[in-house]
Image (cartoon, rainbow, N blue to C red):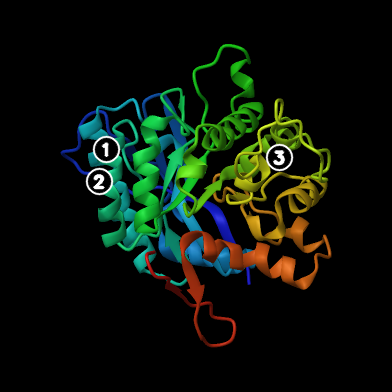
Amino acid sequence: MIIDAHAHLLPKDYPGDAPECFPRMEPVEGSTDRLLVFGQTRFPAKEVFFEAERRVEAMDASGVDAEIVSPMPPLLRYDLLAADGLSLARHVNEFAAELSSHAPERIMALGLVPMQDPDAAAAELSAVVDAGLPGVEIASNILGRSIGDESFRPFFAEAERLGVAIFVHAMPAPMDRLPMSAMGTHVVGIEGTFAAGSMILGGTAAACPDLRISFSHAAGGIAMTLPRANYFWGGSWNEEPVELDRALMHDDGPSPLEYARRFYYDSMVFDRRTIRYLIDLLGADRLLVGSDFPAMPREDPAARTLRAMDLPEEEWQDISWRNALRWIGREPVAAAPGAPSFRGTEGA
């Protein structure tokens, strides 16, 4: 079984009386596609983004049993007024629930919350649960503030309390140190590192030990920084036991690596050597299949690189589907052969 834990949706339409700041989905002449128009964004969206039947057909064609679908990142617009952000989130969440209802065992949809107003975002999580959505997607920064900023901690505490899964998608922050051409490549690595690192360094990982959170694209470069962070935390190379000089080292709780091993990471990193390193450092129980479909084409077949790595059976089962269900708080139940079926766990 394969669950693609990083795939995207777009609502087909928006209300006619929506505020002018809302997106639009304009028809494309002679096509069933739509054009997402949102600020400076012009994104052509095929039917698979918003039609459940097309999604299921695409899954069948690529060997995917189920998807965890999140809104396309351009919808994470925290520059909107808080009230407009909440209205947009509710519309997207209503569509996400409706899309999932067509094939609930194959399309598991995440929603949005208005993170520009952390209190409103926390309050909206109850409505997300009531809508049957297992989690929400947020950006790696909120108007330039990393998600580990203490102002967002009550939001994560409420997500932990309600059992709501969090998907952190890397998004550019205001930056003039790289050209615009780097926004979709190097910035993903930088922002993923900042987001995951801020959760550890800012204290949220310690304060919310049961939070189920996943990072897109393996949280960028975080895995390369963790051994150094561990050295300056406890003086160890290769996590080997050491005699600590307590005047210099700080072993007052879990290490940075131990915190990082509480998170989930999708494995869309484009190279089996990177996946091997992630498994060795973070554990096979931390990785998920991800594709960014349909914003990007899947490997053919899906998870081709992972399939070709000759992973031990338990590691393959964890990465290909079990970790995804653990992340969103669901577990498999008895079903006909070849037909995946899931149920929510307590608190999910």
**Front position in the image: 18 or 160:** 160
Local packing at callout 1 (Cα closer than 10 Å; few below 14, some 14-19, many 20+) is some
Local packing at callout 3 (Cα closer than 10 Å; few below 14, some 14-19, many 20+) is many
Disc 1 element: helix
Q: Is residue 45 left or right of residue 299?
A: left
Residue 307 vs 6, above or below: the answer is: below
Quadrant in the rendering for residue 150 = top left
Picture residue at 40% right of the left edge, 44% below the top = 156
Disc 3 element: helix
Q: Are the residues at dot 1 and dot 2 in contact (C-beta closer than 8 Å)?
A: yes
Q: Is residue 25 left or right of residue 148?
A: left
Residue 247 vs 230, above or below: the answer is: above
Disc 2 element: helix
Residue 52 at what x, y percent from top left? 42, 63
Furthest residue toward top: 176
Residue 20 vs 164, above or below: the answer is: above
Residue designated by label 1: 119
First-in-chain label (2 vs 3) = 2
Residue 326 at what x, y percent from top left? 53, 64
Q: Is residue 288 visible?
A: no
Q: Are the residues at dot 2 and dot 3 in contact (C-beta closer than 8 Å)?
A: no
Residue designated by label 2: 123
**Front position in the image: 189 or 94:** 189
Amino acid type for the residue under numbered disc 3 = Ala
**Front position in the image: 50 or 35:** 50
First-in-chain label (3 vs 1) = 1
